[in-house]
Amino acid sequence: MCGISGIYAFNDAGRHFIGNLKASTDAIEKRGPDSQGHFVSSCVGLGHRRLSIIDTSEGGNQPMHDETGRYTIVFNGEIFNYRELKAKLVAKGHTFQSQTDTEVLLKLYITEGKSFLKKLNGFFAFAIYDKQDDSLFVARDRMGIKPLLVYKDADKFIFASEMKAMMAFNIPKKLDLVSLYNYLQLNYIPGPASIFKGVKKLRPGYYLHIRNGKVMTKAWYKIPYDKKKAKNNPLNYDQQQKELVRLMDESVERRMIADVPLGAFLSGGIDSSVIVALASKYTNKLNTFSIGYKDEPFFDETKYANLVADKYKTNHTVFSLTNNDLYDHIFDLLNYTDEPFADSSALAVYILSKRTREKVTVALSGDGADELFAGYNKHMGDYRVRHAGWKEEAVLALSPLWDVLPKSRNSTMGNRVRQFQRFATGMTLSNKERYWQLATFTNEKDARKLFKKQVARVIGKKLFQKRKKKILDNIHQDGDLNEVLLTDMQLVLQNDMLTKVDLMSMANSLEVRTPFLDYKVVDFAFSLPESSKIDGGMKKKIVQDAFRHLLPEELYKRPKHGFEVPLLKWFRNELKPLITDDLLSDQFIEAQGLFEVDEIRKLKTKLFSSNPEDIHARIWGLIVFQYWWKKWMA
């Protein structure tokens, strides 16, 4: 686990910024608290922070150079098949000075060029400088597990693992208003854009090459989905299950390699339980970790986690939290966040990572399974719209009732009404627009109304629609749910789920590994027909069926609860001054010059009313942005 940053100067003006390299790596110390290193030449600076996962005592520090001194690499991530790749290089006569995957990467690039990326199994972001060619090669892993931000102007090119490391190079902090508009709808910013104009997220599965002052960006991987081939998969359902078990078993085994204490998150859901069941084969006493919610029994799933822990005799730890425990970490989360990100469940991930890091350095998680195999309630909703019968038509007919009944995520009945209302609305929309409706907290009209009129005029509708169209490109009116899942992989997984886990785990110097996102598992998942993943009665069908024999029966076909931070309670109590007197006060809003005071007042009135509905998610998004603005922009 590491963090990287660097700069490539195109001229003398750009070289001036190389002196900011150490400040850049200092900004991401938590990504690599064990050591740091820097390489500086006439036009390039490469920086690295390291946390020891695998023993690198034999020449494994970074930046790393080849034996000739021509090539230099900084690398963030893990290559799980590096030993096999190394053995093949040794067989061809290559020698190595260390036992690291970093040196294997460097040798592969030297001997095979860009094509070597397709041989890698792991997660990564890295940069390699070729002194002789005066070129820089930068690449990011297939799924976007490891982040990489980039910036280019006439004088320089900059890259880094986090925005705070980019800001250390004094990049222009000019708001991208279309990104902010997107954020107000989604509560996160979809890549490749960022909150700042000029700063982009290198797309997952892409590389970037700088040579002779020219920057070339190209895709080296894309999820291989073919609708016709998936519908006609040659394996029957039983064979598909066996293949999934085989691929997942190999994926978990690959990710068990570590010279430090290793554990696994165990939520009580099917995904993390599968990981624990498989990982238990490769260690005598697996460390497992769960969060329990004393004050929120509706969301507490520790009894299911305990069943799995007992079955596999893991060394299980439950962190039982109160709402006060959650509240006590809000400002830790807000202070670490260097780009607006308002998925409130990040708070639970932050605490889980912090507590887990006290006992282990690496943790396995079940992230990615929901996006691959249709595990969210919205997937069932979308499926039922596409296969509507009399029940679905009845929900649509009762739309006026859903509009007036109280709605909330924090109770069974209120959540059901909320779902019925969204479902009824979705039945009236095209496949593309229904996806966007289910993905967002705020519709486009209401989000736009929040801006001052002069600001709203600057937000280019054409640019927003262009970005939205790109996000929805894979969804067609004659398609099936696999297209929704592919879009989820590229929007929700990359920009919300993986961002959340990376930020919160890195804030606590914990590495999280995701076996479901092994590219072999992903490629296989998108070779399957919709019918293997979901039907009218079961989400994530093949995962539940394939691993049913390994797990307690109580987990089979169990409803997914997820987790909701008790924001509404806090907004009406502990956090109320932040809303009324500080970040959402009339005075702050007016001085900031972005938002309409009257529209913010309406949201606050709704928040403190007897029927706040889902307003707390919108308020949280605004608070996160305002806190970010005050810390980084004011």
Image (tube, helix red, strand yellow):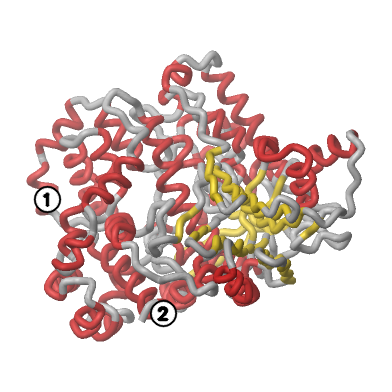
* Label 1: element kind: helix
Quarter-wise, where is residue 289 in the image?
A: bottom right
Residue 131 to residue 43: above or below: above
Disc number placed over residue 181 in the picture, else none: none
Which of disc 2 and disc 1 is earlier in sequence?
1
Q: Quadrant of residue 629?
A: bottom left
Query: Nearest the camera: 112 or 465?
Result: 112
In the depicted view, which residue is nearer to us: 48 or 251? 48
Which residue occupies 61% across, 55% down? 512
Q: Label 1, on which residue? A: 403
Q: Residue furthest left?
A: 400
Pinpoint residue 209: horizontal percent, then vertical percent.
Answer: 60, 48
In the picture provided, is 109 more to the left or to the right than 201? right
Q: Measured from the top left, where is residue 350 in percent x and y?
A: 52, 66
Check disc 2 and give the amino acid type. Answer: Lys
Look at mark 2 in the image and give the residue it sits on: 631
